[in-house]
Image: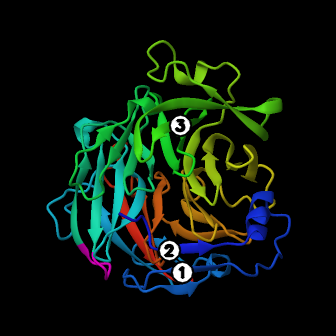
Amino acid sequence: MPIQCATQSVDSTRRQFLRQGFAGVGWVIAGGTLSRCSSSGGGTSTPLMSNIGNVGPLLDPDENGLRLPAGFSSRVIARSSTMVEASSYIWHNAPDGGGVFATGDGGWIYVSNSETLAAVGGGVGAVRFDRNGDIVDAYRILEGTDQNCAGGNTPWGTWLSCEETDTGRVWECDPLGESAAVVRPAMGVFKHEAATVDAANRHAYLTEDVGDGRLYRFVYQNAEDLSTGELQVAEVQGGGPEGVVEWRTVPDPSAASEETRYQVPTSTAFAGGEGIWLHEGVIYFATKGDNRVWTYETATSTLTILYDAATSSTPILTGVDNLTVTPAGDVVVGEDGGDMQVVAISAEGLLVPLVQVTGQDGSEVTGPAFGPSLERLYFSSQRGADGADLLGRSGMTYEVTGPFFI
């Protein structure tokens, strides 16, 4: 099952500029084209370019309480504790990390974790859309697990759901719900946050959401098979925070003898690992404790800071959490804290607010993911309106439609 039907050819100059930061805000991007499916989600391919750097300011809240740029619209697709349209599935509490998967009939599926205990939710739910964007079904694809936080898509069309507990593991799930989810213990036992897969090198990268968490790499042995492999942990040479990374073997991925992050004393600590994504040989990930977005160049093993709120001249992005990257290289980040925005670090190096959720300051933005046509952005407000309990029973999941690409 393909994850999306967009293809890309982005010039190396843009990639270099993005990784170097925001010094040249006036940079003009030339060259580089993308193609996508038709707006209905079908197979017609049309050229397009990212428009994220050009969207205007956020307007007054719409009927769903979202501030959007001109030309964008929203709808609520699911509410916690409420039956999803066209299904018998009661949408889970505390919707968190999410991903989109294209289907063979021109539609797509949005999967969403439940960051709460199995006794009151947990696991993963999914909403299925037809080629026109209408909801046609919703269902559960994983149950009986705790604190499923973020995760990641695999190139072979499965969803990795990560448990954020001391005994947390990674579960590989079928977005269609036709096959039972499978636990992947070789990927380590720790407070998992998110995952991304570099299939070309048979590597999976994993973040850990604790104040002194680590960045991990899982080297799997067989293509499209995460059942066996070696768990490694990052050590930044020279004392960091930036530099060349050496990968050290974690002696006991089961954590039966000692927590994984302490097993290699020279490994580098990160202040609360959050979302992670692979794009054109670069791993992007966020650390919430210090409000940073990082890049790791897989070809050179070099780690750099892409965005740091503490040193930014325009620190409008704070509480960095879940993230995704568009085919054009725009890094789109949801805020946990901050002012409940989805903010893009555009391919041109601009900080661009795309959405702001109003009246829900006690919540957090989770699970940003684009639909196959790149015209629709999905995300959740984990706990919904102010006053919602910690189980997230007022969680809301949204779809925003507009000219992200033109």
Quick one: label 1 or label 3, which is nearer the N terminus?
1
Please give the residue where the numbered disc 1 appears in the rendered image: 35
Residue 14 numbered mark, or none: none
Give the SS element for disc 2. Answer: loop
Quick one: label 2 or label 3, which is nearer the N terminus?
2
Instruction: Give how far across and how far down residue 64 sits, in percent.
Output: 40, 73
* Colouring style: rainbow
Q: Which amino acid does label 1 sit on?
A: Ser
Please give the residue where the numbered disc 3 appears in the rendered image: 219
Magenta span contains residue 154 = no
Between marks 1 and 3, how big is the CA–CA gap?
Answer: 32 Å
Picture layout, residue 211 above or below residue 398: above
Give the SS element for disc 1. Answer: strand
Tell me if residue 381 can be seen. Answer: no
State the residue in front, 96 or 356.
96
Between marks 2 and 1, how big is the CA–CA gap?
Answer: 6 Å
Region of the chain picked out in magenta, as a range:
130-135
Instruction: Give how far across and how far down residue 352 sits, in percent.
Output: 66, 70
Tell me if residue 172 can be seen. Answer: yes
Callouts 2 and 1 close, C-beta under 8 Å? yes
Picture quarter with the C terminus? bottom right
Please give the residue where the numbered disc 2 appears in the rendered image: 6
Which numbered disc, 2 or 3, marks the residue closer to the eye?
3
- In the image, taking residue 387 as reference, residue 51 lies left or right, namely right
Picture layout, residue 216 above or below residue 160: above
Q: How crowded is mark 1: few (under 14 residues within 10 Å), some or many (20 or more)?
A: some
Q: What residue type is labelled 3?
A: Val
Residue in view at x 23 percent, y 55 percent = 177
State the residue in front, 174 or 144.
174
